[in-house]
Amino acid sequence: MKSIFHNILIASVVLSLTCAPAIVNAMPEPAPVAMTEKEKAAAAKAKEAEKKKKEAEKAKAAKEKEKAKAAATKEKEKAKAAAAKEKEKEKAAKEKEKAAADKEKQRAAAEKEKAKQAAEREKLAAEREAEAARKEAEAQAKEEKALRDYEKYQESLENPKQEAISYINLGARLGYAAMMDKINDYIGAGTLNQSNPLQQLKGGVGFGFDATYNLEYGHFLFETGLDLRILNSTSTYGFEATRLDKNYPGTTYSYLFDKLGETRNLFQVGIPVMFGAQFDRYYFLAGVKVHYSAIGNYSQKGKYDIVVNDPALLEPYGMGIHDLNGKTGQAIKFLQPDLSIAAEVGVDLDEWLQQSPKPADPKDKKKKVQPGQRLPFGREHIHYRAALFAEYGVLNTNATPAALPVDFASNQVEVQNSNTLLAYHGNTKLNNLFVGAKFIVQFEIPGKTARPVPPPPAYALYSVVDAQTNQPLPVAFVETHNSNGKITLKEKQITPKGFKQKCALGSYTAEAKAEGYYNATQSFDIEEVGSTEYVTIVMRHRPVLRVRVTNKETGLVVPANIQIRKRGETASAYTMATDSLNSSASLMLAEGPQYTLHIAQMGYDTLDMAITDIGDSLNLQLVPVKKGEVFIVKNLFFATNKTRILPTSEGALNDLYMYLARNPKVRIKIIGHTDNVGKDEANQILSEGRAEAVKNDLIERGLTPDRLEAEGRGEKQPIDTNDTEEGRQNNRRVEIEIL
């Protein structure tokens, strides 16, 4: 029952809410009440206000709607932009990840390539080291072999073995030649009577060439081979020949030959067999030479006089002098062979013609080729000789058939024919003679003969080490002189591996230089060939004086010029200049003297102090001058009696500018002074002009004019006498006063 009532109540409420508007609309409007004009106007005004209000609300609603729409559009665009941005961000992240992956990949590839290159470098370095070790081993083995060969050769010199040495000789001869025919009589028979022969041997020139084999065994010599010679000899003959005239019985003709010249030429090929001995530079050979006469001829030239003896006349009469139309180039027949006794005496020329070796000791000026010593020339030995020789034929070489020297015709007065004088009797002996000088070139045939072995070179192995660590210096330079002061090693860079130099026997001094070290010298001797002298040069570090300069008040760096003086002296032994970056400088001072340090920097108090250790590191603080203090600008120069600043003042002006630039709060007064030469007014103007010139220069460099004042005081405030030039120069100055 209760629930039913509850349901009826709910239904009533619902119906009332649903039907209320319809009921209101269905109800008739109440009858209008009559209104006054004022009320009508008020009602119309209210209605207009209500209308405007509704329009305003409508416009507001439209505006709100438009605003909401714009906000929605903006929100939508914002969301879209955010989505695009997020998408772009995701894309950038992906690209970044990809780039990182590519970079990592590239890095890995680079690392791999780097590792590969490192491996290749290590491999190449190992190969180079192996090659260097191999070459060094080969060089060492070569040096050891050279030393063994030299020692073996020296032993062979000390204990020489008798060796047979063979030579091929090429010789050339030039000298006097003669063919001695030994015609002692000249007596004919039959129709020709000859008597009173006269022979004069003139001889001629001989040439000879030989190619022989020479054997030397100790002092013993043997020689044989091929010998060629050309002999030329002239003889003159005087004789008389007579004949009867068959047509006039009792009449005779006499033919007087004063000088019939006969020149003979002979070319022979032979074989010598010679024996002899060698003593130091001298030698001799003796033996025989067997020659075959290959070519021989003769030529005649002369005149004769004809004298007629006629019985019908009391005295003989002459028919004049006639030329003998003798034979030219007529062959001569010779007996074979021609056997000659030969001898040769000579001297070796090696010690004069061969190049001497360089002496081990430069002071030794003697020739190094001793008598009898042979030196190598290329693969073989070549030697030189000069000699005197003589060859005499002991066998008759004439084989000319017998014939009269001249022939006549029965009906002719003059000589019709001539023959060689060697044809007389057919048994005229002919012996050949050849004497002269000879030059020989010998080629030694390589064999077991001990050959000179040059001494193997000795070496100096340089190394330069630190005196404290005993470790090799990274870089050093070494120069070496021998005992005569001659440079044997020009300045050479020595690395930690050292340097090996060939050296002759003798004494040497090596000087080493290295940056940061004192120069060092080391003397050494090379006493044995083939040896290696280890030359270790120990170098000491040079202490370095380091100086840093700052402003005591501000702590800022101060570029300063520093003078280093020996104690008790005013002249500078060294100068240092600190830089403008950290105001530091370093210098190596010589050991021994004691030094003082002096700084006179513009704008700061002068600093003098003793240097206790030349290897110190000094931090110096300069005290800037105070307000009211005055200092002189040093090294500031003007043209004479002018305000023009000379270019040599650039350093002083720049120092003053830098001081003011580093201290921007400092104001100064530039004060010019002069000496008392000239008028007071002129000096006053000059001092003012010079002060203004300095001021203008500083302004041009960048300083503001409000920090600078200029004043001239002429000659009023001298600081020295004006009676001397030096005093006047001190009075001509520019001062700076701190304001």
Image: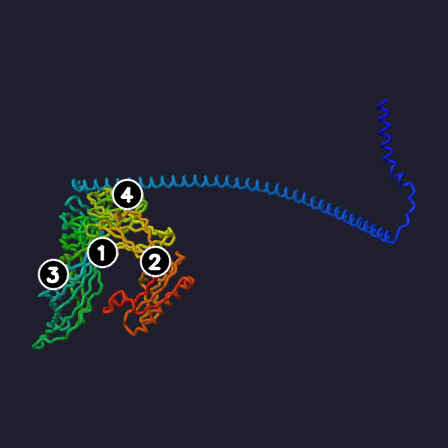
Task: Please tell me whether residue 630 is drawn above or below residue 113 in the rendered image.
Answer: below
Mark earlier in primary sequence (2, 1): 1
**Other-residue count near label 1 (Cα within 10 Å), few / some / many at <14 / 14–19 / ≥20:** few
Q: Amino acid at mark 3?
A: Ile
Looking at the rendered structure, the secondary structure element under dot 4 is: strand
Q: Nearer the viewer, residue 138 or 676?
A: 676
Residue picked out by circle 1:
569
Return the residue at label 3.
183
Q: CA distance from mark 1 to mark 3?
A: 112 Å
Residue 243 seen in this snapshot: no
Residue type at mark 4: give it: Asp
Question: In the depicted view, which residue is nearer to us: 640 or 42?
Answer: 42
Q: Earlier in the sequence, mark 3 or mark 4?
A: 3
Nearer to us: label 2 or label 4: 2
In the displayed structure, does residue 451 sit left or right of residue 189? right
Sort mark 4 into few (<14), some (14-19) or many (20+) by Cα contacts within 10 Å. some
Residue 732 in percent (x, y) is at 29, 67
Residue 734 image position (x, y, % from top left): 32, 65
Residue located beneath label 4 in the image = 466
Tell me the amino acid under the disc marked 1.
Answer: Glu
Quarter containing the C terminus: bottom left
